[in-house]
Image (cartoon, rainbow, N blue to C red):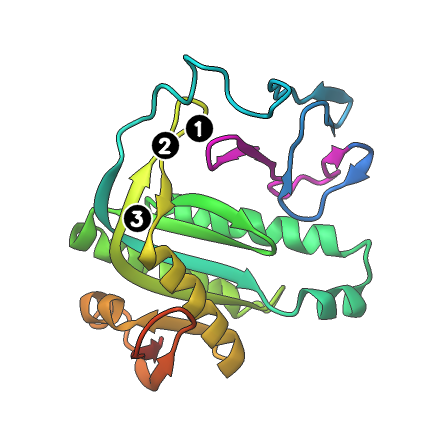
Amino acid sequence: MVHTQDQNEYWLVDLGSANGTLLNGRRISQPSRLADGDEIRIGEYTLTFHQPSDASGEAPMGGEQQTLLKIRADDCWLVVADIEGFTRIVQAVGLEEVPRITRRWVADCKQIIDLHGGTIDAYIGDGLLAYWAGGDAAAARVAAALGDLKQRQAAEDPRFRVVAHFGRVTMGGSPTTSGNHLLGREVNFVFRMEKVASALGIPRLMSSPAQARIGAMLPGAAVGRHVLDGFDGDFLLYSF
């Protein structure tokens, strides 16, 4: 899959193929950003990725600079899933085995998110950001997705964290991207939560706004108030 991200950013993702996907002759083990002229090999087929630009690297006038899709604000559920200790995994299983593990994990997470009506907004390093628009109407679908991700965690192949938040985000796109891209304070908030989860060694963490809406469907326990980098004050967080 070629996944669009931001305005002129494209990522190649292998969703668990048996023989892998090669980018410029190297088998990819995680989502990899594409550049103009990259060679993609899938089985017996070789594809060339083209993303031309002018000498300045700017979009030509009359193109993307001139027209943007609608920008709107919406209440969204935000979920970050991130593999724990990627370096430790490489040391434990060996470099050749890592692509199989990460591809299968990405494919499993995507299947769960798709099944429950979510959308993957971005692949970041060894993780991903997914969202559900629609506010409270999507609560049951989000709770079900988090429950399935919790079950997937039980396999510990690999171990990964899941963090959930609810808030109002800015959504927008451009003619060169499909769907929406998320921006704003709440997006930063959920990534700061992931850092807290990592520091505490907690596999699943939920914000107060999220817990207030789905706590009855996905019971949890308060883990105290915590400071998040870049945000004033402290915030009550919950495990689930």
- Residue at the extreme front of the image, as rendered: 56
Residue 4 percent location from the top left of the image = 50, 33
Asked whether the beta carbons under mark 2 and mark 1 sit within 8 Å of each other, the answer is: yes
In percent of the image, x 75 and y 27: which residue is there? 41
* Helix, strand or loop under label 2: loop
For the residue pair 22 and 154, the one nearer the viewer reads as: 22
User: In the image, what residue type sits under mark 3?
Assistant: Trp
Residue 74 percent location from the top left of the image = 22, 46
Q: In the rendered structure, find residue 177 and report the number of the disc placed on it.
A: 1
Magenta-drawn stretch contains 160: no
Marks 2/1: CA–CA distance: 6 Å
User: In the image, what residue type sits under mark 2?
Assistant: Gly
User: In the image, what residue type sits under mark 1?
Assistant: Thr
Marks 1/3: CA–CA distance: 18 Å
Q: Which residues are magenta?
A: 1-23
For the residue pair 69 and 108, the one nearer the viewer reads as: 69
Marks 3/2: CA–CA distance: 16 Å
User: Which residue, given by chain and number where applicable, does mark 2 sit on?
Assistant: 173
Asked whether the beta carbons under mark 1 and mark 3 sit within 8 Å of each other, the answer is: no
The mark nearer the N terminus, 3 or 2, is 3
Compared with residue 144, is residue 183 higher up or lower down, i.e. above or below?
above
Q: Nearer the viewer, mark 3 or mark 2?
A: 2
How would you rate the neighbour count of disc 2 (Cα within 10 Å): few for under 14, some for 14-19, many for 20 or more? Answer: some
How would you rate the neighbour count of disc 1 (Cα within 10 Å): few for under 14, some for 14-19, many for 20 or more? Answer: some
Residue 130 percent location from the top left of the image = 41, 50
Compared with residue 64, is residue 118 higher up or lower down, i.e. above or below?
below
- Residue at the extreme top of the image, as rendered: 62
For the residue pair 97 and 18, the one nearer the viewer reads as: 97
Q: Quadrant of the C terminus?
A: bottom left
